[in-house]
């Protein structure tokens, strides 16, 4: 039986860590931590709760990022010591098996760290606003949209990322027409932006009394959360504001006041609805934040399209369908861009999508490199 070449593997791990450290710049991280720590120690920090939350979140994120990098070196050292101990004992099989398992774990964690270094886009470090809309497929599509909402919320929950559902529009029979939520953690946009596109579900429809197979679609949109420094000014004359009563499955406060808000950006036709906050003022503020985020991303897309036009590049980008979820006649989730696929569909719908996100980020970086 072939044995693992530990010296070669450990040398490769050290090389990968060195590359990650060069890009991540631990000294710069320490400088950011010192700066955020000073801000967090200010006696008037919590006078502005939103600003305070941003400071404490940024501090925690920087500390975690530095810890992941610095601890990785210690883990590789410990692995090397474990291998030496096993060798000194004349090839202790149990210790070698432990070293093998640790090698695989370190390699996986290094891969995740490496992916973070690929998130260098203009808005990658932002928090994210995600909107899911049901597409073709009737009630199955609405049910699929709700399945995707749960999938992404469970993904965030697995990582301890705070989320806030901003708007839900329920379908008549089951599921959702649309839903919008925030993921309130740095780099949420960089990670989730590769999830944008059309998702397809194939299964035996639970809503078809003849038990026929049904194909349905849902669209996922991901935009970076707007910040005050982005300067996306929207004149009042370009916005139409409609108010209406919130709707939803039950609850004494439903359909009692005109608290829901719909903003329409007249020049682009972009529509944003919010109804999950208790007051019209809160819903309008949330809707404006999402509208500005979408306009910001559209401006970036227009600039990128213009550059492609000037360069004579007329290739299509990702296309309409980016991932298929097949539950019948076999079990498989496959990303059509990266070719990454898994057979455990239940785990995917329960939020186990890190491998898809990592593969998507690597694919996007490779596509960008080819375009240069």
Image (cartoon, grey):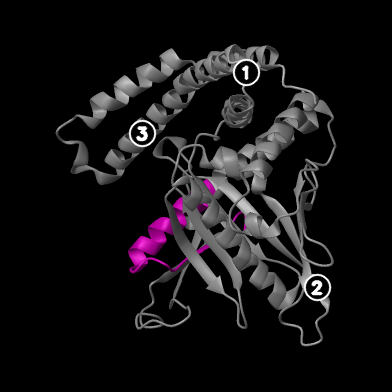
Q: Is residue 370 above or below residue 197?
A: above
Count of picture labels: 3
Q: Nearer the viewer, residue 61 or 316?
A: 61
Q: Residue at x 61, y 40 (%)?
A: 299
Question: Which residue is disc 3 drawn over?
Answer: 60
Residue at screen point 51% across, 15% down: 77
Whichever of callouts 1 and 3 sits on the residue coming sooner in the sequence is 1
> Mark 1: which secondary structure?
helix
Q: Nearer the viewer, residue 225 or 239?
A: 225
- Distance from the alpha carbon under mark 2 to that under mark 3: 45 Å
How many residues crowd around disc 3 within 10 Å: few (fewer than 14), some, or many (20 or more)? some
Tag in front: 1 or 3: 1
The residue stretch that appears in magenta: 266-293
The C terminus: image quadrant: top right
Label 2 residue SS: strand
Query: x, y percentage for residue 76?
Result: 54, 18
Q: Dot 1 surroundings within 10 Å: few (below 14), some, or many (20 or more)?
A: some
- Please give the label number shown on residue 344: none
Q: Is residue 2 left or right of residue 252?
A: right
Query: What residue did someone put label 2 on?
Result: 214
**Extreme-bottom residue of the structure:** 209
Q: Tell me which residue sits at (39%, 77%) in the image.
A: 258
Tell whether 158 sits left or right of 350: left
Check disc 1 and report the residue beneath it. 13
Where is residue 333? Give x, y as percent. 75, 54
């Amino acid at each position: 039986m072939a044995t693992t070449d530990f010296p070669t593997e450990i040398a490769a791990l050290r090389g990968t860590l060195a590359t990650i450290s060069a890009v991540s710049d631990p000294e710069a991280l320490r400088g950011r931590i010192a700066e955020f720590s000073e801000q967090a120690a200010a006696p008037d920090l919590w006078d502005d709760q939103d600003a305070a939350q941003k400071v404490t979140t940024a501090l925690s994120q920087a500390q975690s990022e530095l810890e992941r990098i610095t601890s990785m070196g210690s883990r590789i050292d410990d692995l090397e010591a474990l291998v030496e101990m096993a060798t000194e004992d004349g090839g202790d099989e149990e210790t070698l098996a432990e070293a093998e398992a640790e090698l695989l774990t370190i390699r996986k964690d290094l891969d995740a760290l490496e992916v973070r270094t690929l998130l260098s886009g203009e808005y990658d470090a932002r928090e994210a606003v995600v909107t899911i809309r049901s597409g073709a497929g009737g009630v199955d599509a609405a049910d699929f949209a709700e399945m995707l909402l749960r999938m992404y919320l469970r993904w965030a929950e697995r990582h301890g990322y705070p989320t806030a559902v901003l708007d839900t529009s329920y379908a008549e029979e089951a599921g959702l027409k649309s839903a919008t939520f925030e993921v309130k953690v740095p780099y949420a946009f960089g990670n989730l932006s590769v999830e944008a596109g059309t998702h397809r579900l194939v299964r035996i429809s639970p809503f078809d009394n003849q038990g026929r197979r049904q194909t349905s679609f849902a669209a996922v949109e991901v935009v970076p959360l707007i910040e005050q420094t982005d300067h996306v000014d929207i004149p009042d004359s370009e916005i139409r504001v409609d108010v209406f009563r919130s709707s939803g499955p039950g609850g004494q406060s439903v359909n009692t006041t005109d608290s829901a808000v719909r903003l329409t950006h007249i020049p682009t036709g972009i529509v944003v609805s919010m109804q999950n906050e208790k007051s019209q003022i809160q819903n309008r503020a949330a809707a404006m934040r999402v509208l500005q985020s979408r306009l910001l991303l559209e401006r970036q897309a227009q600039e990128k399209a213009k550059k492609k036009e000037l360069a004579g590049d007329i290739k299509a980008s990702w296309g309409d369908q980016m991932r298929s979820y097949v539950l019948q006649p076999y079990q498989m989730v496959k990303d059509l861009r990266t070719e990454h696929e898994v057979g455990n569909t239940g785990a995917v719908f329960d939020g186990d999508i890190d491998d898809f996100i990592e593969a998507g980020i690597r694919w996007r970086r490779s596509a960008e490199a080819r375009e240069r």
